[in-house]
């Protein structure tokens, strides 16, 4: 590797071709201020600063390769249970021996027209020669409804083959299925997100809290999904004719009020991290896999539907879920592999890099552990998704837990996926929860939900506002109901109450704590 140091120009693109023969880059901010460097460095993907040390498990997916692990000695030569890592649907490894190849975009050496011809050729051969002609024709019809315009997808410049063929395969896969499943996949498609501009759309609250500006969520997809993809402009009779009001005018299906409400649904959609075994190599982003949700971008407020109700009507209230739902029939667990970072929650980076973090390790005799391990002989055979087919009895520390986040089975982690339910925006008897200590922010919370940890205070002759965690708490940043927090404190001879500080644990291991 031949590092190159260079000055950042004061205008235009901050770095121009600072690439050595190994496709690696070192850059310094010689002659420029630190704020200028901080502003420009966000435009470039990076591992860290020169001299930093990073754990292999913390590398982004496009760098978590066997070749890199082998070179730096991160692969254990011993045997052990394997972990499935999923790509896109029906994705397989490249097999050069098949002899079927096509050019991919590098931005350097292949004419654009030749690149575009790849997907046209692949589609034409499959559509005309495949044996499932009815499926192919239905897929073609669906593709005329849920259109993505290549030139509108700027991240790939319209030149890629795999991303557009993958999008089209949604219609092939669901040709004889449910239109709702198609809409779900289209909504999470990064191509549609960019085509109709809701990718990285943020809530008005997020924009105001971070920029001080009053803005609205992007309305493009909210309008098109109603007008073009589903209900249309006017209400219809069963025979397809338009319904009319008392003046003989067609009745609108929706108004701009509903568009604004639905726009708030389509906030928080972001691309997944880049990875290997995909065509995208030039723009350094993942334009293939379904988008994921960034919780901080999501709109937190209720949304009206088209019938006078709210989105979510018909789902159970979260407060009505039975106790120990994580052990009941239907409870779902999603494989995380050897990385404990949850996907449905936002965790601090400190929680990954600190080996002293207290995690929820399932007891060797736990029925839940037995289900997740799925052992054949002495080796666990971890499934990507585990859904409990019967109620399980709580065992060991499970008796103390209201709701887990991530559970550990040996060296492997599973995330508990709570069933879809509705949190009411207004509720009775709200309680205050405080983040880390009295000097951080506080929120109102429903005391019937497991959303905060206990904060136990001494109640003797010398009261203090320095609180303690429950002596038997199960994992760092554990969340319990207010009733559980009270019971835990009473068991330790303390009182759940308002506090100044939590003693005995570092700040990054704390979260929200109940007050009084």
Image: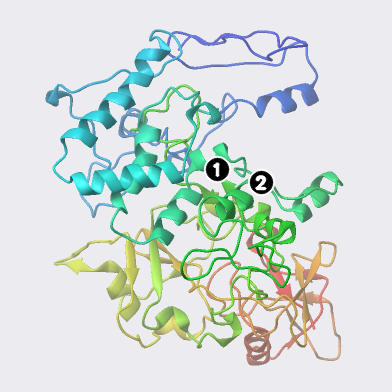
Q: Residue drawn 65% across and 59% down?
A: 262
274 vs 253, left or right, is left
Rendered location of residue 207, percent (x, y): 78, 48
In this picture the colour scheme is: rainbow
Q: Determine the residue positioned at 59% across, 41% down.
A: 196
Query: Which residue is identified by label 2?
Result: 201
Count of marks placed on residues: 2
Which one is in front, 281 or 66? 281
Q: Is residue 118 above or below residue 404?
A: above
Q: Where is residue 15 in the image (x, y as percent from the top left)?
A: 64, 13
User: Does residue 127 lie above or below 219 as drawn?
Assistant: above
Disc number at residue 434? Answer: none
Instruction: Identify the secondary structure beneath mark 2.
Output: loop
Mark 2 or mark 1, which has the lower sequence index?
1
Residue beneath disc 1: 193
- The image quadrant where one finds the C terminus is bottom right
């Amino acid at each position: 590797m031949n590092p190159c140091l260079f000055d950042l120009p004061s205008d235009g693109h901050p770095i121009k071709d600072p690439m050595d023969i190994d496709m690696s880059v070192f850059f310094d901010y010689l002659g420029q201020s630190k704020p200028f460097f901080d502003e420009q460095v966000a435009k470039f993907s990076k591992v860290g600063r020169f001299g930093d040390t990073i754990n292999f498990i913390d590398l982004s997916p496009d760098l978590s390769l066997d070749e890199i692990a082998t070179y730096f000695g991160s692969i254990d030569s011993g045997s052990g249970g394997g972990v499935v890592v999923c790509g896109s649907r029906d994705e397989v490894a490249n097999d050069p021996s098949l002899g079927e190849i096509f050019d991919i975009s590098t931005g350097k050496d292949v004419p654009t027209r030749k690149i575009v011809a790849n997907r046209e050729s692949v589609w034409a051969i499959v559509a005309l020669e495949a044996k499932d002609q009815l499926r192919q024709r239905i897929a073609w019809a669906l593709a005329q409804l849920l259109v993505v315009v290549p030139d509108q997808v700027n991240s790939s410049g319209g030149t890629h083959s795999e991303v557009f063929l993958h999008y089209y395969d949604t219609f092939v896969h669901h040709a004889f299925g449910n239109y709702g499943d198609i809409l779900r996949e289209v909504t999470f498609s990064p191509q549609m997100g960019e085509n109709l501009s809701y990718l990285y759309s943020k809530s008005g609250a997020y924009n105001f809290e971070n920029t001080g500006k009053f803005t609205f969520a992007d309305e493009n997809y909210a309008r098109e999904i109603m007008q073009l993809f589903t209900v249309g402009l006017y209400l219809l009779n069963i025979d397809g004719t338009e319904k009319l009001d008392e003046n003989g005018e067609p009745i609108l299906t929706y108004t701009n009020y509903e568009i604004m409400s639905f726009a708030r649904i389509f906030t928080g959609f972001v691309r997944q991290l880049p990875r290997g075994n995909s065509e995208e190599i030039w723009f350094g982003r993942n334009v293939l896999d379904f988008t994921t949700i960034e919780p901080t971008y999501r709109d937190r407020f209720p949304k009206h539907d088209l019938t006078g109700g709210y989105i979510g009507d018909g789902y159970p209230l979260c407060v009505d879920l039975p106790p120990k739902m994580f052990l009941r029939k239907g409870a779902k667990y999603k494989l995380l592999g050897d990385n404990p970072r949850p996907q449905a929650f936002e965790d601090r980076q400190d929680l990954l890099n600190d080996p002293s973090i207290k995690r929820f390790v399932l007891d060797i005799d736990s029925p839940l552990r037995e289900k997740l391990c799925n052992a054949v002989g002495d080796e666990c055979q971890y499934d990507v998704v585990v859904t409990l087919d019967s109620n399980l009895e709580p065992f060991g520390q499970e008796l103390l837990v209201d709701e887990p986040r991530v559970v550990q089975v040996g060296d492997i982690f599973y995330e508990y996926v709570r069933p879809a339910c509705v949190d009411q925006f207004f509720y009775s008897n709200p309680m205050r929860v405080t983040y880390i200590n009295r000097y951080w922010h506080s929120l109102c919370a429903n005391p019937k939900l497991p959303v905060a940890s206990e904060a136990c205070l001494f109640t003797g002759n010398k009261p203090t506002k320095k609180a303690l965690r429950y002596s038997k708490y199960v994992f760092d940043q554990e969340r319990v109901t207010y009733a559980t927090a009270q019971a835990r404190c009473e068991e330790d001879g303390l009182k759940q109450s308002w506090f100044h500080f939590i003693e005995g644990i570092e700040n990054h291991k704390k979260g929200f704590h109940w007050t009084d």
